Image: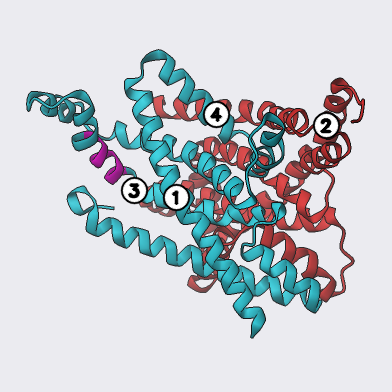
Amino acid sequence: MSTIATGTILWTLIQSARWTLALSLVAFLGGGAAGLVVMLLRAGRSAALARAAALYIDLFQGTPLLMQMFMAYFGLPLLGVEVSPWLAAALGLTLYAGAYLGEIWRGAVQAIGQGQWDAAASLGLGRARQLRLVILPQALRLAVPPTVGFLVQLVKATAVASIVGFRELTRTAEIISNATFRPLVVYGLAALIYFALCLPLTVGARALERRLGRA
Amino acid sequence: MDDLAALLAGAAITLGLAGASGIAGMALAIAAAGLQRGGGRAGRLAVGLYVELIRNTPFLVQLFFVFFALPAAGLRLGAWTAACLAMTLNLAAYATEVLRGGFAAVSPGQHEAGRALGLRPLAVFRLVVLPQAIAASYPALVSQIVIMLLESAVVSTIAVRDLTYAADLIQARSFRAFQTYALATALYLALAVGLRRLLLGAGRRMLAGGRG
């Protein structure tokens, strides 16, 4: 029986939660960029590109995140890229987030009626400026609440990175639990930290949604 | 060829887990939704706390808690049972939320009509309101079951012999990791698409009003 104090365990877990946050942030930024491309392809004129974007979404929403990370971990070396758990986790989560954000944002763009496109076209705007000046400002309002809601999913999804050996909150909890034989305390505290990270986002998303409903 | 058989055996375990937790999870979600509606303030509070706790923590941590931490509290479970319990608790929380939306879609007049027929409150819930709430939220419930099937890939970490576990064993022996995981991923995709079609098709035949 180890004598590591509960306070020390908590502090170590909180320290490791920084990596959970860093991974979430990287995946959100990378996934945001990928999601933007997906949304543009789906709103664009090329049917082939729109189909390719839809296929990407279906593939990444229809397979486990863990498999996506393993494919990144074992696939990148085949392309001659040296891989670390951090890179595999970041790439896997980025592609995962890109599929979900792309789908959310596509839905927001689609919710803006055809009349707005027609009105913008009748002002003599080209397709790109119709999207940028007329459609996106309206779609953005609709997109914010589900995007914040997806952040909760993303923060939780980073726990899967522990399986490819990236030392974030869950991996650290495993290591401490194995060393101290106090799984009840360690996993309980880890769950509480995730809860503290996610609950504000959940509550925020709900408040934003209500405000949108009233407006 | 043996490898393919091993993957298919793993896929059967994965599907079995999804099926068992799907049935148990839906039963638990219906009970939770009933408690939320008819259990007074305490019922609403308890269900709300359960739903938020599950929805704001990762499934993997919930799994580790059930498998590693509950034995410290005196409840020792086998790997398959622990995985099934964690999946059931997780799925039920999301399904409770979905069902809440389904109940909101059923007009209050339905409840009053049931009462006017002389049915007791529990019978009104079971025979009148619940079938309509399930029919209204059925596609979203199916989505949750499919999401749980995909999330179950992480139960390989507690040595449940599911599809991912089979792939882990094969790649460790053959050193063909990418091909093995690609094949396993394709099988997951087929399971997800197949399960969704099956459940949506069954819903069209069985649900109130032929919707779903």
- Are dots 1 and 2 on a single chain? no
Mark 4 or mark 3: name the one nearer the start of the chain.
4
Q: Which residue is mark 2?
A: A13
- Are dots 1 and 4 on a single chain? yes
Seen in the image, is A119 located left or right of residue B68?
left
Judged from the image, the secondary structure of the residue bearing numbered disc 3 is helix
Q: Main secondary structure of the magenta part?
A: helix
Residue B138 image label: 3
Query: Which residue type does callout 1 highlight?
Result: Gly
- Are dots 3 and 1 on a single chain? yes
Q: Is residue B61 visible?
A: yes
Q: Are marks 2 and 3 in contact (CB under 8 Å)?
A: no
Q: What is the CA distance from the residue labelled 1 to the residue labelled 2?
A: 33 Å
Q: Which chain is cyan?
A: B
Count the numbered circles shown. Answer: 4
Span shown in magenta: B129-136
Q: Are marks 1 and 2 in contact (CB under 8 Å)?
A: no
Judged from the image, the secondary structure of the residue bearing numbered disc 4 is helix
Query: Which residue type does callout 4 highlight?
Result: Glu
Q: Which residue is mark 4?
A: B52
Q: Are marks 2 and 4 in contact (CB under 8 Å)?
A: no
Q: Which residue is mark 1?
A: B22
Q: What is the CA distance from the residue labelled 2 to the residue labelled 4?
A: 21 Å
Judged from the image, the secondary structure of the residue bearing numbered disc 1 is helix
Chain for mark 4? B
Chain for mark 1? B
Above or below, A143 relative to B149: above
What residue is rendered at 42% in x and 35% in y? B96
Classify 10 Å Cα crowding around label 2: few (below 14), some (14-19), many (20 and above): many
